[in-house]
Image: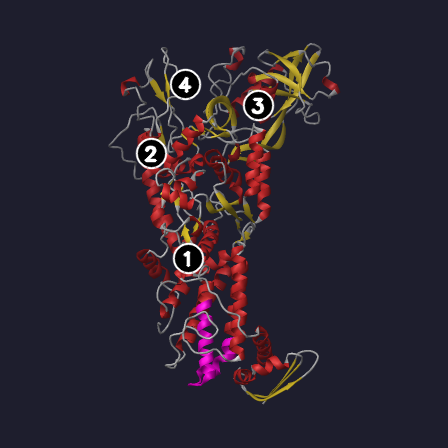
Amino acid sequence: MPEKPTLDGLEQVWVARWETEGTYRFDRSKPREQVYAIDTPPPTVSGSLHVGHVFSFTHTDIMARYQRMIGKSVFYPIGWDDNGLPTERRVQNVYGVRCDPSLPYDPDFVPPEKPGKREISISRRNFVELCHKLTAVDEQAFEEVWRRVGLSVDWSLLYTTISDESRTVSQRAFLRNLARGEAYLAEAPTLWDVSFRTAVAQAELEDREWPGAFHRISFYGEKGPVWIETTRPELIPACVALVAHPDDERYQELFGTSVLTPLFGVEVPVLAHRLAEPDKGSGIAMICTFGDITDVTWWRELHLPTRPVIGWDGRLLPEAPDGVDAEPYKELAGKTVHSARERIVELLRESGDLDGDPRPVQRTVKFYERGDKPLEIVTTRQWYIRNGGRDEALRERLLGHGRDLVWHPPHMRVRYDNWVEGLTSDWLISRQRFFGVPFPVWYPLDESGQPVHDAPIVPSEDLLPIDPSSDVPPGYTEEQRGVPGGFMADPDVMDTWATSSLTPQIAGRWESDNDLFQRVFPSDLRPQAHEIIRTWLFSSVVRSHYEFGGLPWSDVAISGWILDPDRKKMSKSKGNVVTPLDLLEQHGSDAVRYWAANGRYGVDTTFDPGQLKIGRRLAIKILNASKFVLGLAESESESGSEPGSESGSAGGGAVTEPLDLSMLAALADVVSEAGEAFDAYDHTRALEAVERFFWAFCDDYLELVKARAYESGGAGAASAHAALRQALDVLLRLFAPFLPFVTEEVWSWWREGSVHRAQWPSVARGTGDPAVLAVASEVLRQVRKAKSEAKLSMRAEVSTLSVSGPEAELVRQAQDDLCAAGNVEEFVLEHGEVLKVEVHLG
């Protein structure tokens, strides 16, 4: 035991020792019923972690440590989600490059030390190499933070979502989905981000307020002008119909007729549909291919033609759609949406088809959650996985899986149900990007060099992972790539969720280590944030349903958000995050973990630096109280007894005094309460119970027992020593899941092995009555209060201490300890109706 215990430097000491000694290594020899498996979230490696990550990951670690102490072999892997758009964007910003798949690979390419204003175009292979290079740096920084936080993960189980193993699992699952008809290729209107030039899935959408303006525009009808109001006049050349509600009396005579579009003179029908809104604008709207999701619904249900005008780059296409006059269209060709809108408004004003000035309006627009421009809808060929969006029977089965899950907290299941019930399309899993898991598919080319998409070529599973852009399909040679009668690779990569949805299979080494997989799948726990229930949780359920017919885990624990002082969610995009490393260095890891542990599952928590100070004070108090307890002299007879029993402790000796027995009985209740809370996934209630007892133990029991504990010899001193050491033994184990560093440090002063490999404590309640300590503590508080009000030292003498009330007999059992702690000359006990304490100072 050090002469002056300190928290400083504990993290470096114990992180290194835990790794050297394999403290948290998973024991794969245990049968499945003795394993607790966690499907740990792989954080996105695109910058730095923030306190929100520390908050939620600490919750999981607390549970992992508890499960380890109750005898489970804990399968606790860690992964990095290192493929996808966030990584690509970071590579572009850091190195000043942009991927151009048409360029050849340059083996000698070196990115500039200082990126210029204009991005350098490089080949896909060069770009991917930079992605790997940058993620390796980021992952090292992430690992440093997680080790500093004290996560008890088994680092030998580390995986990344772009590794060969992950790509193999992802491609294997896709091929099986394809073979069973659960995955399919289709050409259809697709939500499209023009900045990233990629398709976006329904789960990745975000509604944002966006400024616009209503334009009142005239179409030409048989009986005069038909006025529509639109925020997107640039889509007039894409118009295929006008639509109004079937019950709208204003347009009954127009239904079944046709009108001409302004400027372009294209004849389009006037149709009725229930989704038209009579009270919006003029009540009649353009159907364009495509302006929004409602346009897609109208187009599909009314069997309308397609006149696309917006390209993948967000500009109007260079050529007019079929049937549209090329002369006026050339005024718009190649322009951005914004520029095209400005120009067509000028043209409409010149032609007299614009009524008045546009009226400004704020409207809700769909964005990609990581994008900064409104989404467009373009027609593309994409890969989908059926998810119940268009299959009622499948939807009901997936809702049933949601009911079978154990949710912590239970009300979070509503978010799952609402998402599944609100699905309108299947899961779009392809992305037109570069750093991701490629689709293991080629297409034969016909004699004219066109791909035959309905006859895809797939590899056998034993060849996985493959990259079709460099690997050759069976029966072909590289010389046949891209030539008539040859083949072409599928150019897309999978959405990152298509791989992340398989994290239980990836971590469990599905199909590559069947012995391990049988021990850890399905997992016991999926911890995650509530905003990705619709993406990560649901998609994982879908993939497990298809492959295994059941759930990938039994329980899900949903974390809340961390809010800034203005009660806004912390996020890197908003710039209001707090990075954890400074906090860990300033306050210590145990203090940061204490703050996190005070947040419950499913509850948004405001970041409070004050909690960090309380946590550090608690850790220091554990050090000092432990030094006091372990510094007490032991007689030779006080040795050899086992901890955890009423008759003995780490110091041995019999616990005989009523006050000591009372304290241990109260501690036994705390052990039960904490265990019950942990079993209910309520780590905060467990911490509250342990902390409440600990402060009372330090403030009251230690003061009450101190004088007797300092005595040399005698049964009273031996009882105090035994009780104190048994309490310390138990308290260290109770605190260990929350404050792993300080508890391990104190444990090492007097114990062999690690406290994190010790058993969860079990204390016999015995013959003690917790009320003895409770009443004695209250009397002592009254004595302290009297001295404080008299501005006297706590060691000042009390001439007479009178206690009356129904608890008199309980107080009598602690009389000697009370007199010693309060420096009482005369002690008087009387019966009475209520507890009354009178303190007469000398």
Asked if the stretch drawn in magenta spans residue 721, the answer is yes
| Color theme of the render | secondary structure
Which span is picked out in magenta? 701-730
Q: Position of residue 783 (x, y in %)?
A: 59, 81
Q: Are marks 4 and 3 in contact (CB under 8 Å)?
A: no
Query: What amino acid is at disc 1?
Result: Leu
Q: Quadrant of residue 291?
A: top right
Which residue is located at x 70 percent, y 14 percent? 254
Query: What amino acid is at disc 3?
Result: Val
Q: Are marks 3 and 1 in contact (CB under 8 Å)?
A: no
What is the number of the mark on residue 455? 4
Distance from the alpha carbon under mark 2 to that under mark 3: 35 Å
Q: Position of residue 624 (x, y in %)?
A: 43, 72
Mark 2 vs mark 4, foreground winner is: 4
* First-in-chain label (2 vs 3): 2
Work out whether residue 683 can be spotted: no
Asked if the stretch drawn in magenta spans residue 590, the answer is no
* First-in-chain label (4 vs 3): 3
Left or right of 532: which side holds 128? left
Distance from the alpha carbon under mark 1 to that under mark 2: 34 Å
Nearer to the camera, 570 or 360: 570
| Residue where numbered disc 1 is placed | 584
* First-in-chain label (1 vs 2): 2
Which residue is located at x 39 percent, y 67 percent? 747
